[in-house]
Amino acid sequence: MPAEPPKQDELDAVWKALSDSTRRSILDLLRQGPRTTTQIVETFPRLTRFAVMKHIDVLRAVGLIHTRQERRQRINSLNVVPIRQIYERWVGRFEELWASHLLRVKEDAEAEAAGRSKKRPKIG
């Protein structure tokens, strides 16, 4: 049975979480692999631990980060599913539209270039 598509308000929350550059930087960091909360905090020396943890909480609340407890540490890892859902819902649809437009531009440019090459005198 296929998974139910996400509700619009769930996607809105993901968009809102992604709108912040610090949160996007945290996700970029987690693309490289899981990190402890301390490692993430140390990556942002200009922010307080509390501020970074609030960003992590926002990302966790919308499902972009999974956190597991390992002894005394919290290990954070990236969950790409919400980003994939946004891609499928929004980006993918526009990608198809742009692909057809770009293909037409390419074909027109090639036709124009072929027309010019026929008109040019050969040197030699």
Image: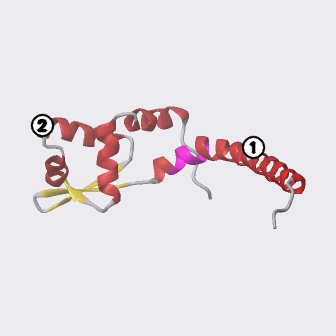
Q: Does 103 sit left or right of 16 as displayed?
A: right
Q: Amino acid at mark 1?
A: His
- Residue at figure coordinates x 60%, y 40% from the top left: 90
Name which residue lies at 31% across and 45% down.
Answer: 25
- The part of the image, by quadrant, that contains residue 97 is top right
Q: Tell me the mark number nearer the camera, choosing from 2 and 1.
A: 1
Along the viewing direction, whichever of 50 and 63 lies nearer the viewer: 50
Q: Residues within 10 Å of mark 2 (few under 14, many from 20)?
A: few
Q: Secondary structure at mark 2?
A: loop
Q: Measured along the vertical axis of the image, is residue 23 above or below residue 39? A: above
Q: With 119 as the anchor, is 9 left or right in this view?
A: left
Q: Is disc 1 placed on a helix, strand or loop?
A: helix
| Residue 48 position within the rendered picture, expressed as x and y whole percent measured from the top left | 12, 37
Indicate the amino acid at tag 2.
Answer: Thr
Residue matched to label 2 = 48
Q: Is residue 96 left or right of residue 116?
A: left
Q: On the rendered structure, is 37 left or right of 29?
A: left
Q: Residue at x 66, y 41 (%)?
A: 94
Find disc 1 in the rendering and name its residue.
101
Mark toward the start of the polypeptide (2 vs 1): 2
In the picture as drawn, the residue positioned furthest to the front comes out as 124
> Which image quadrant for residue 71?
bottom left
Where is residue 41? Give x, y as percent.
16, 47
Give the residues in magenta.
Answer: 84-89
